[in-house]
Image (cartoon, rainbow, N blue to C red):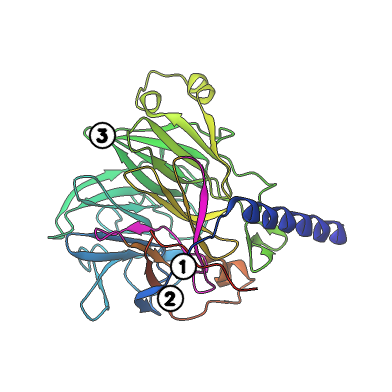
């Protein structure tokens, strides 16, 4: 059985190697360069946002690093708690209503406000603590908390991992990477609904392993890590939501159906269509013209998928190991927190493979990497 499993892994690796080779078009006459924006040894950052003249970073509690759950970078590139120390002062047994438990995502809404996605789960795969799972809307310029959106136990269930958020008019959409569902939030009323719960489009597939450094990433010994619906984007015209498991593929569904609470689960599931057969990614962002930027975990790469479906590699560099959720800055550069999540001791029987320091980098998304010389 052991030799059979090894054989299957070799096949999986070969399949994904072939996929990347087919879909990428790394042709350019200009060199792509990485600009290191900041470094740290205190936070395994997997989220970055630029708003209100500040750079904000965040990292989940379960990675085991001592920095604040959410911070902003000072002029000297130190991480200061944001919005304050109390919000970052949660400990087991303390009230989580006005404190971050474990933050997985930061995102700037169209009105320029910073949204914090708190999974409420202090341990990887754990149960959300009482009042822990929530969304927090903050004025990035002043640090004033504008509203807290609780995600109660009917939304953030046992086994849920509320992952990321995108906006469309008066609605926001979130992914539950733990229990495989989309969450639709009415921003005005604060009411949230679970949709496509355990649908085929939101579940991770076992035939699409996450491969890094030539090995299948495992949650436990001989158990490949499976991450349900994780990345999501809204089309520039607001008519479609694109989403998929971390391992791919991506689907699309009309937002008009998502926004209507009277649409049945069967009708909504029937409206889901295939969109893009993307490989396992660390994160994504979409610009106003519909270009999708995503990080390819297998080759430490950053890619662009244009509206025609053509995929172009912008850069592949070993320093970009598990580059997580990218963020387009106001000046057009693409910022990337380098999380190295697969190197955590959690995924290596207690032995950390992290290479310090953690990097926060940016690249020019309009430049592609020159083809390597043979």
**Residue found at x 42% / y 19%:** 263
| Picture quadrant of residue 10 | bottom right
What is the spatial separation of the Cα atoms under label 2 and label 1, in whole angstroms? 7 Å
Start and end of the magenta stretch?
A: 308-332
Figure check: 264 above or below 73: above
Left-right relation of 271 to 56: right
**Residue found at x 29% / y 59%:** 332
**Residue at image mark 3:** 169
Left-right relation of 85 to 316: left
**Residue at image mark 2:** 358
Asked which secondary structure carries label 2, the reply is strand
| Picture quadrant of residue 54 | bottom left
Residue 362: mark: none
Quadrant in the picture for the N terminus = bottom right
The x and y percentages for residue 39 are 37, 78
Tell me whether circle 2 and circle 1 mark residues in contact (CB < 8 Å). yes
Magenta portion: prevailing SS class: loop
What is the spatial separation of the Cα atoms under label 3 and label 1, in whole angstroms? 31 Å
């Amino acid at each position: 059985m052991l030799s059979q499993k090894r054989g299957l892994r070799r096949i999986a690796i070969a399949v994904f190697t072939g996929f990347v080779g087919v879909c990428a078009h790394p042709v350019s006459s200009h060199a792509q360069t990485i600009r290191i924006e900041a470094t740290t040894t205190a936070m395994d950052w997997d989220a970055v946002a630029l708003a209100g003249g500040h750079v904000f970073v965040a990292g989940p509690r379960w990675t085991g690093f001592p920095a604040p759950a959410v911070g902003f970078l000072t002029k000297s590139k130190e991480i200061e708690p944001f919005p304050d120390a109390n919000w970052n002062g949660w400990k087991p047994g303390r009230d989580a209503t006005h404190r971050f438990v474990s933050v997985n995502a930061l995102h700037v809404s169209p009105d320029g406000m910073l949204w914090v996605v708190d999974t409420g789960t202090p341990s990887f795969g754990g149960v959300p603590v009482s009042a822990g799972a929530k969304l927090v809307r903050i004025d990035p310029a002043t640090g004033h908390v504008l509203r807290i959106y609780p995600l109660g136990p009917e939304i953030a269930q046992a086994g849920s991992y509320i992952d990321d958020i995108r906006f469309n008019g008066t609605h926001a959409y979130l992914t539950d990477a733990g229990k495989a569902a989309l969450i639709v939030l009415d921003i005005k009323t604060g009411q949230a609904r679970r949709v496509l719960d355990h649908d085929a489009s939101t579940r991770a597939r076992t035939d699409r392993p996450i491969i890094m450094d030539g090995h299948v990433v495992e949650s436990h010994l001989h158990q490949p890590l499976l991450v349900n619906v994780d990345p999501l984007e809204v089309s520039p015209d607001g008519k479609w939501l694109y989403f998929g498991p971390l391992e791919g593929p991506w689907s699309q569904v009309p937002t008009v159906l998502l926004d209507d609470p009277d649409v049945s689960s069967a009708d909504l599931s029937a409206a889901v269509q295939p969109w893009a057969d993307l490989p396992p990614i660390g994160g994504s962002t979409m610009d106003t013209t519909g270009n999708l930027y995503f990080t390819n975990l297998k080759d430490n790469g950053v890619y662009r998928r244009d509206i025609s479906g053509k995929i172009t590699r912008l850069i592949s560099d070993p320093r970009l190991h598990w580059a997580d959720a990218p963020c387009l800055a106001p000046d057009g550069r693409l910022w990337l927190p380098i999380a190295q999540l697969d190197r955590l001791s959690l995924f290596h029987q207690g032995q950390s493979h992290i290479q310090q320091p953690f990097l926060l980098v940016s690249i020019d998304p309009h430049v592609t990497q020159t083809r390597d010389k043979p």
